């Protein structure tokens, strides 16, 4: 596709940082625990530069204020999953320093989650799943249907808490992602915020596909980088007999599209309720917010 702008020094620096971290992890070196979050920071800079080069507009360069809020919200939006993990025992971490820097590194890692997902989805939108500019108008779902979907989401969020912390517990973690998606999408649709449900009702699937692809790609990158890292998380899913890529079993990848969809729904709801400037995926014009 035609290039709208140069890749730029920031993109080259980000790509260099990411590739350098990958090389460090691949070599038998005793790397610092910050290599993982640093790799994702470089990834964000490189992907944002690629989107800007392809479209002339990107999440970070066009709306740095909204992107800063995206990174800050990312920390707090991930905390519910940490809480559910404490209850269901889906993973545990090793290799992190025992002092206060442990929480600095965790916060840095959490701040990268939503930017990584959104930047990857934005790149997919720029290259393949192109949006047509303005959202196609769709009739909002009725109140009864919206309440039913939201209630189903609430049930999925509560169901894992009713299960004893046994071998079954960790398999219920994908229900949390589905629960947040179903609970918040009706609120986003009713509140006039960007909504994947409205996208589907208007037969505009580009954002759905891009977010699903971002969930898969980021999950694969995360699994690979984590496998070679000293400071890492370990999956407790006992599905390894089905085969694994690195740490995650094959079946876990089926749930990764939910990560992209749920992340979008949670961000739109939080940013809308707090009246924050928003990063819009696939934005083309200078007036997009």
Image (spheres, helix red, strand yellow):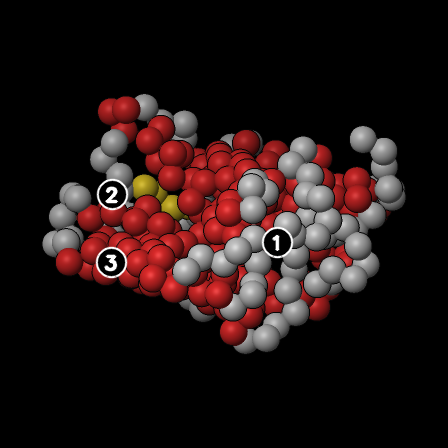
Tell me how far mark 1 sits from mark 3, CA to CA. Answer: 30 Å
Q: Which residue is mark 1?
A: 137
Determine which quarter of the picture holds residue 171. top left
Determine which quarter of the picture holds residue 271. bottom right
Measured as percent of width and height from the top left, residue 281 is found at 65, 51
Mark 2 is surrounded, within 10 Å at the Cα level, by few (under 14), some (14 to 19) or many (20 or more) other residues, namely some
Residue 270 drawn above or below residue 12: below
Residue 274 drawn above or below residue 210: below
Measured as percent of width and height from the top left, residue 270 is found at 50, 68
Name which of mark 1 and mark 3 comes first in the sequence: 1
- In the displayed structure image, the side of residue 179 where residue 232 appears, left or right: right
Residue 171, numbered label:
2
Name which of mark 2 and mark 1 comes first in the sequence: 1
Look at the numbered discs 2 and 1 and tell me whether their residues touch, using CB distance below 8 Å.
no
Name which of mark 3 and mark 2 comes first in the sequence: 3
Q: Nearer the viewer, residue 20 or 168?
A: 168
Measured as percent of width and height from the top left, residue 208 is found at 53, 43
Measured as percent of width and height from the top left, residue 134 is found at 70, 52
Element under disc 1? loop
Quarter of the image with the C terminus is: bottom right
Tell me how far mark 3 sits from mark 2, CA to CA. Answer: 16 Å
Residue 155, numbered label:
3
Q: Is residue 251 visible?
A: yes
Element under disc 3? helix
- In the displayed structure image, the side of residue 169 where residue 73 appears, left or right: right
Q: How many marks?
A: 3
Residue 213 drawn above or below residue 267: above
Look at the numbered discs 1 and 3 and tell me whether their residues touch, using CB distance below 8 Å.
no
Closer mark to the observer between disc 2 and disc 1: 1
Mark 1 is surrounded, within 10 Å at the Cα level, by few (under 14), some (14 to 19) or many (20 or more) other residues, namely few
**Residue for point 32% across, 41% down:** 235
């Amino acid at each position: 596709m035609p290039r709208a702008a140069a890749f730029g020094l920031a993109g080259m620096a980000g790509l260099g940082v990411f590739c350098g971290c990958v090389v460090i992890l691949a070599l038998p070196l005793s790397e610092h625990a910050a290599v993982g979050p640093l790799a994702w920071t470089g990834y964000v800079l490189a992907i944002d530069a690629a989107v800007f080069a392809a479209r002339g507009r990107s999440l970070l360069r066009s709306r740095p204020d909204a992107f800063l809020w995206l990174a800050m919200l990312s920390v707090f939006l991930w905390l519910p999953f940490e809480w559910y993990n404490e209850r269901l025992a889906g993973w545990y971490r090793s290799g992190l320093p025992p002092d206060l820097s442990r929480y600095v590194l965790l916060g840095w890692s959490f701040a990268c989650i939503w930017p990584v997902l959104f930047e990857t989805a934005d790149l997919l939108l720029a290259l393949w799943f192109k949006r047509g500019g303005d959202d196609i108008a769709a009739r909002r779902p009725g109140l009864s249907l919206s309440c039913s979907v939201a209630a189903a989401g609430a049930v999925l969020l509560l169901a894992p808490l009713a299960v004893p912390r046994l071998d079954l517990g960790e398999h219920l973690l994908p229900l949390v992602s589905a629960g947040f998606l179903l609970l918040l999408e009706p609120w986003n649709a009713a509140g006039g915020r960007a909504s994947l449900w409205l996208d589907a009702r208007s037969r505009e699937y580009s954002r759905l596909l891009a977010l699903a692809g971002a969930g898969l790609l980021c999950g694969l990158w995360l699994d690979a980088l984590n496998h070679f890292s000293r400071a890492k998380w370990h999956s407790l899913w006992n599905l390894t007999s089905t085969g694994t890529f690195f740490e995650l079993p094959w079946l876990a990848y089926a749930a990764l599209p939910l990560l992209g969809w749920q992340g979008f729904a949670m961000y739109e709801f939080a940013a809308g309720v707090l009246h924050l400037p928003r990063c819009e995926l696939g934005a083309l014009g200078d007036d997009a917010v």
